[in-house]
Image: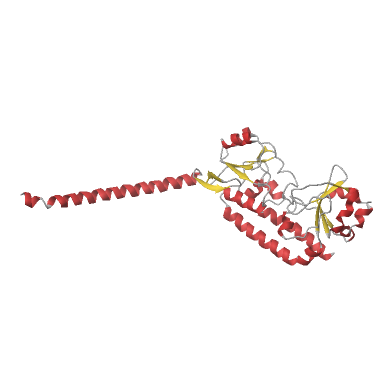
Amino acid sequence: MVLSSSPSIPRARKRLLRVVATVSSLALLGSALAGCAASADASDSGSATRTVADSVGDVRIPTHPKRIVATDFFSSSVLVDVGVTPVGVMQGIQEPGSRPQRYIDALKGVEQVSTYAEINVEKVLDLDPDLIIVDAAFPEPETLKRLEAIAPLFRVDLTGSWSKRALSIADAANHLDTAQKQQRSYDERAKRISKHYRKVLDENPLAVVSLNTNDATWASYAPGGWPTPAWVDIDAVFRTPTDGEAKTSTDWAWISDEQLEKLGNAGFIVVLEPEQLSRYENNRVWKSLPAVRNGKVFSGFEAPATSSFEWGQDSLDTVESILQKVAQG
């Protein structure tokens, strides 16, 4: 009996092990499917997170942020470009002339929560954001700590490359693909304009000039200054600054109207404050400038501070219109 029963024990054990293995596999499969479903639900609800790079380092943010507060001057336009309307923005960005009109229209009625030097934390809290975009150089660390307790912070560098900043903001909103397509379109057009008007640009150095509204002074922007992005992107030739003028984009110097002759090396001049040109109506030095004599002074370049690729297309519209007139002159 012992000999006849001994072979049946291993067979029974094998059958039992197969049953256990099958049940375990089904249990694991069920757990995996449940995990996938939970992950999908989390992603759909916007509660899932991912790691992205802002201007300071890596930061963990919602995969699909739904309520973004943009406290700086530039980010809101990038968001509008990729189809996102922020729930909070900076004061002043809805003012006429601050940016192309379609952004002003898109942001009409959005809560204003910040200035360059201050963020209203209580207003931000009331908006229940899941992501807050801030200037990396914002001067009040205590405010940033309070904001960080509300939602993840995404820091942007307002002094670096505008196109890199735009892509990073679009990435934070999880719309990087859209922004990259817009970037390609912008870059291709800028190259076409640069090539088509290469001779005009080389023969006519550019001066982008601001006329002081408070006293009789003016200033010329170096490449990289806030109103120059579109000109830089088409590789425009800027006039050489003279002694006393700003030499780089981070410098600034007001020059007396008594020294308007310094602009004599400009092939064409773009004036940012057209209403101030009337003060030169009887100024003999101004009238003697080559750009003025040749009818190559232009104004009306609204919102040249390009900060997103669709905004950039608007800037290129104006740039191309000006260059057509320079070429005709």
Query: Which one is nearer the viewer's eye here, 91 or 201?
Result: 201
Answer with left or right where residue 36 lies relative to residue 292: left
> On the image, which quarter does residue 129 sit in?
top right
Q: Position of residue 51 (x, y in %)?
A: 52, 47
Residue at (72, 66) in percent of width and height: 195
Answer with left or right where residue 75 lies relative to residue 10: right
Q: Position of residue 6 (x, y in %)?
A: 10, 50
Residue at (38, 49) in percent of width and height: 33
Colour scheme employed for the rendering of this structure: secondary structure
Query: Which one is nearer the viewer's eye here, 247 or 204?
Result: 247
Q: Is residue 134 visible?
A: yes
Q: Position of residue 243 (x, y in %)?
A: 84, 52
Answer with left or right where residue 32 lies relative to residue 264: left
Depicted 321 relative to depicted 106: above or below: below
Q: Is residue 83 visible?
A: no
Residue located farthest toward the top when viewing the structure as drawn: 122
Where the C terminus falls, by quadrant?
bottom right
Query: Which one is nearer the viewer's eye here, 114 or 158?
Result: 158
Q: Position of residue 119 (x, y in %)?
A: 66, 36
Residue at (23, 51) in percent of width and height: 18
Query: Which one is nearer the viewer's eye here, 283 or 65?
Result: 283
Residue at (67, 54) in percent of width and height: 310
Total label count? 0
Residue located farthest toward the left when viewing the structure as drawn: 1
